[in-house]
Structures are given as C-alpha cells and as structure tokens.
Amino acid sequence: MPATSKQPSLRKRARPQMMEEPKPPFSKQRQKPPGLESKLDPRPRFAAPRYKAAEKLKGKVALITGGDSGIGRAVAVLFAREGADVAINYLPEEQSDAVATRKAIAAQGRRCLLLPGDLTEAQTCESIVAQTVKELGKLDILVSNAAHQARKESIEEVTDQEFDLTFKTNIYAYYRLVRAAMPHLKPGSAIIATSSETSIFGSSQLPDYSSTKGAINALTKTLGSLLIKKGIRVNAVAPGPVWTPLNPSDPGMTPEKIAEFGKSNPMGRPAQPEEVAPAYVFLASDADSSYITGIVLPVMGGETTGG
C-alpha cells in the first residue's frame, strides 16, 4: 500500500509537554520586589495552548489574588477560557502586569476587573470582595494565591517585621478573604488556596514562608470540613518550584541561583504556570471535583509525599 500523509508513522509527533517546557540554565537576573512578569527571561508560559476548554466554569465569577502574574495569571486565563468572568487583585506596583492579564482575559471574551490593593490591610480583603460582587454581580470562586517570600541564611535574620509581613500576606489574607466572601458564596462555590511544597518538606531558608504554607494547609482542611454543610468546597494546591516573578524578586536569591532555579527538581526544571493552572480548574469545577474537599493537591514535578 502506498504511503499517505494520514499514516501515523509519517506524522510529526509532538513531544509531551513535560519535555518541552524551558529548562535551566536561565539568564542571571534580579528584580526589586514584588517583581514583574514582563521583565522575566524567559517569559513564563501561561497560555496553555494544549489545554482544551469545555465550559466547566461557564457563568461563574472568580476572584484571584496575585492574579496579575505567575500562577495567578495562568489560573485567571484558564478560568476565562472555561467561561468565567474574573477579578484580580495585585499590588499597585504590578499594574502593568495586571493590564496584560486583563488583555489576555478579554481575548477569551470574558470580563476582567482590576483590583489593586495591599492584602496585609484587612480593609483591602473586604473591599475587593465587595467590589467583585458589585461589578461582576456575584462571587462563585475565591482563589487566595498572593504570597510574600524572602529567603534568609539564618533564623536570626528573620525580623519581627518580616515575620509579620509574611504571615499577614500569606495566611491572614486567606482567612480574611474567606470571612468576607462567606455571605456571598452559594452552594456549589469553591475556595482554593495556593500552598507550597515547603508546607510539606519545610525550607531552611524560608522558615516564615513555609510556616504560613503549613498554616494554609491546616486552615484549608478545617474550612473544608466546616463548609461541607453549606455546599462549599475548600482545597489547596501545593506547587513545587514555579517560574514566576516571586523568585527573582526574592532578596535572598542571587542571579546565579535564579539561573539554576528548579534544576534540583526530579524533572530538572521549574514548572511553568500553564502546567499548574489546570489543577485550579479541576478544583473549581463542581463537575470534576464534587467529592473533593479539604485536600492539599501536590503539583511538584516528581517530588513525592507519604501516603
């Protein structure tokens, strides 16, 4: 039989995505906190071209903190592709990244509300929830994703001020956002927090950060149990190393370490945001995860945990 272009043996086979994402060494680079995605080299991948949307979140409204860049941007874009309107919170210094995220969401035909503000202030947590409901009509999905981290060589270097900043950004905000959102969340709603592999393994250079991530896990499990009767599911995602502005803007990271970021992971690289975001879609979708609440889902590139 003569060969045809339809025969599988003659097609150009794409390599699996896990083998196609960028690997170190990257460029040696540093940024001032909080960092911008637009200045990262290479740019983080968030568009997820291989992802196939299926209207899993059609008609939903989501609020995502840290939605301007990194994991938050990728989650916001996938939520939009699944049919949700999205509000994103970020620091005022990250406005240019937020505008780029809004453009990516608009390209999916969905609305994007920009809500700059400092989450260490209790009023911000309350106001961004209220603004989301006022402008977009309701709130179905809350994603507490914004985080602060700053590596230190010793515990003595972690000042009370730094400790407070990390806890107020990472865990206080999560609690305050949930409290503010509760009057608006209906049965079928979902709450998702961003944890970390450091919540499981700890981190010698991030004692405050890893402590907050452990607290996020405990609060997630508690809320998951507490809100079952209300029909609201609460889960967390624990990523391994991810290529985002959080790392080159960490004052404790050197340009040399950034160039090798993620190399020690079993996959030999950090995750790209587009690889982590589908986990949030899964946990936000009642059709996909209706029997799942109170879990911490590891997305760690081959790192394993007990159980």
Image (cartoon, grey):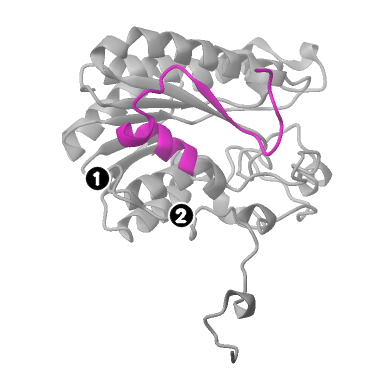
Q: Magenta part of the protein: which range?
A: 278-307
- Residue at image location 78% in from the left, 12% down from the top: 155
- Judging by the rendered image, the residue that carries numbered circle 1 is 58
Residue 62 visible in this rendered orientation of the protein? yes
Work out whether 50 lies above or below 291: below
Locate residue 195 relative to residue 113 in the image: left or right.
right
Locate residue 251 relative to residue 165 in the image: left or right.
right
Q: Which mark is residue 232?
A: none
Residue 167: in magenta span: no
Q: Which mark is residue 51?
A: 2
Locate residue 283 relative to residue 24 in the image: left or right.
left
Residue 306: in magenta span: yes
Q: Amino acid at mark 2?
A: Tyr
**Extreme bottom residue here?**
2
**Disc 1 packing (10 Å; few <14; some 14–19; many ≥20):** some
Q: Are marks 2 and 1 in contact (CB under 8 Å)?
A: no
Q: Amino acid at mark 1?
A: Lys
Q: Residue 293 versus residue 61: which sits nearer the camera?
A: 293
Q: Residue 100 versus residue 192: which sits nearer the camera?
A: 192
Image location of residue 281, percent across then percent down = 40, 39
| Labels 2 and 1: the sequence-earlier one | 2
Look at the image and tell me in which quarter the C terminus lies: top right
Work out whether 253 lies above or below 11: above
**Extreme front residue here?**
1
- Residue at image location 63% in from the left, 14% down from the top: 211
Work out whether 64 lies above or below 153: below
Image location of residue 66, percent across then percent down = 46, 36
**Disc 2 packing (10 Å; few <14; some 14–19; many ≥20):** few
Look at the image and tell me in which quarter the N terminus lies: bottom right
Locate residue 61 relative to residue 19 in the image: left or right.
left
Image location of residue 103, percent across then percent down = 36, 58
